[in-house]
Image (cartoon, grey):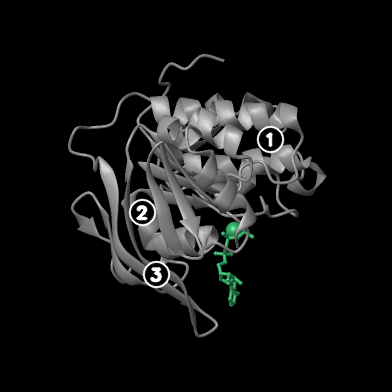
């Protein structure tokens, strides 16, 4: 597979970044994200690292409208205040949640189609084409029941559900959790291609080396606060921060 953009470029008028300002999140009556600010750039991979319980999923669920939040999230000029998850997706931000869940009773193709935003025949066909271009192995299994897929194939379906909507930005919560190294390589390749085609990717990944090899930018969360914002290369040179991020919780 090559790294050439496969979906044509995005329009210059499309938003070039997501800007998160002063984000706070409470869960179970307790503040778990404390006033964090960062941005995610179109065409680049940004990785969000941190120990178990640091607040990675809470951050991205709040961005995607799944959890209530304080602060602002702007997608280019659009302030996503009060947007429900479906509205956030329509605005151009797709979340691949933790756990690669699929609708087991549906076929692979129907799983992808339920996530299509354009219900017209042309829209559905284009969406499927995008999904199958990036994951040809799903095209081969289009009629198969999703419950029969391997964990890696289920993660491909979950990612295809994001690609089908031609998102400008995409968040993947735990790319490799529980998956075999060979399939993780495939998934990482797909994210590289997505970024090369102009999508801004925010990646949560337990293996810091894998994440930092893929990413341009890096964020490190510790107990709901950002302790590093910078380039992936700069973070690689800071084992103290990486060590803290993975042992502290
Ligand atoms: N449903 C919930 N109700 C109350 N508190 C929660 C809930 N889910 C998570 N939390 C708390 O919110 C904080 C952040 O959790 P979160 O799941 O966002 O972290 P994470 O970085 O994604 O962790 P992991 O690496 O385990 O996925 C933790 O203190 C956690 O205990
Ligand atoms: Mg999580």
The numbered mark, 2 or 3, whose residue comes first in the sequence reads: 3
Q: What is the quadrant of the N terminus in the image?
A: top right
Q: Name the quadrant where ligand 2 sits.
A: bottom right
Q: Which label belongs to residue 142?
A: 1
Q: Position of residue 110 (x, y in %)?
A: 63, 46
Would residue 155 be seen by someone viewing this image from the given angle? yes
Q: Which label belongs to residue 34?
A: 3
Queried on whether the Cβ of the residue with tag 1 lies below 8 angstroms from ligand 2, the answer reads no
| Other-residue count near label 1 (Cα within 10 Å), few / some / many at <14 / 14–19 / ≥20 | some
Frontmost residue, 173 versus 118: 173
Q: Seen from this angle, which residue lies furthest front?
A: 240
Could you say which quadrant of the image residue 140 lies in?
A: top right
Depicted 172 relative to depicted 86: above or below? above
Depicted 205 relative to depicted 9: above or below? below
Tell me the distance, in whole angstroms, between the alpha carbons under discs 2 and 3. 28 Å
The numbered mark, 3 or 1, whose residue comes first in the sequence reads: 3
Tell me what residue is drawn at x 40 percent, y 25 percent.
196
Q: Position of residue 137 (x, y in %)?
A: 68, 27
Tell me what residue is drawn at x 65 percent, y 27 percent.
185
Of tags 2 and 3, the one toward the viewer is 3
Q: Position of residue 56 (x, y in %)?
A: 52, 58
In this rendering, position of residue 117 left or right of residue 140? left
Could you say which quadrant of the image residue 42 lies in?
A: top left
């Amino acid at each position: 597979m090559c790294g050439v953009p496969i979906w044509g470029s995005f329009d210059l008028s499309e938003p070039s970044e997501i800007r998160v300002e002063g984000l706070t999140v409470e869960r179970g009556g307790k503040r778990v994200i404390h006033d964090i600010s960062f941005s995610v750039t179109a065409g680049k991979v940004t990785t969000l690292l941190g120990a178990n319980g640091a607040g990675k999923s809470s951050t991205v669920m709040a961005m995607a409208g799944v959890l209530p939040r304080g602060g602002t999230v702007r997608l280019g000029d659009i302030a996503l205040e009060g947007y429900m998850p479906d509205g956030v997706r329509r605005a151009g931000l797709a979340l691949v949640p933790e756990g690669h869940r699929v609708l087991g009773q549906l076929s692979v193709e129907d799983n992808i189609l339920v996530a299509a935003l354009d219900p017209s025949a042309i829209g559905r066909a284009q969406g499927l084409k995008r999904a199958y271009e990036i994951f040809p192995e799903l095209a081969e299994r289009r009629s198969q029941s999703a419950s029969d897929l391997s964990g890696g194939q289920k993660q491909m379906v979950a990612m295809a559900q994001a690609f089908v909507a031609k998102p400008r930005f995409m968040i993947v919560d735990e790319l490799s959790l529980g998956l075999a190294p060979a399939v993780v390589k495939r998934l990482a390749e797909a994210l590289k291609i997505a970024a090369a085609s102009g999508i801004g990717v925010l990646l949560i990944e337990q293996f810091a080396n894998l994440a930092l090899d893929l990413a341009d930018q890096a964020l490190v969360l510790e107990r709901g606060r950002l302790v590093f914002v910078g380039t992936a290369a700069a973070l690689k040179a800071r084992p103290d921060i990486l060590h803290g991020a993975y042992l502290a919780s």
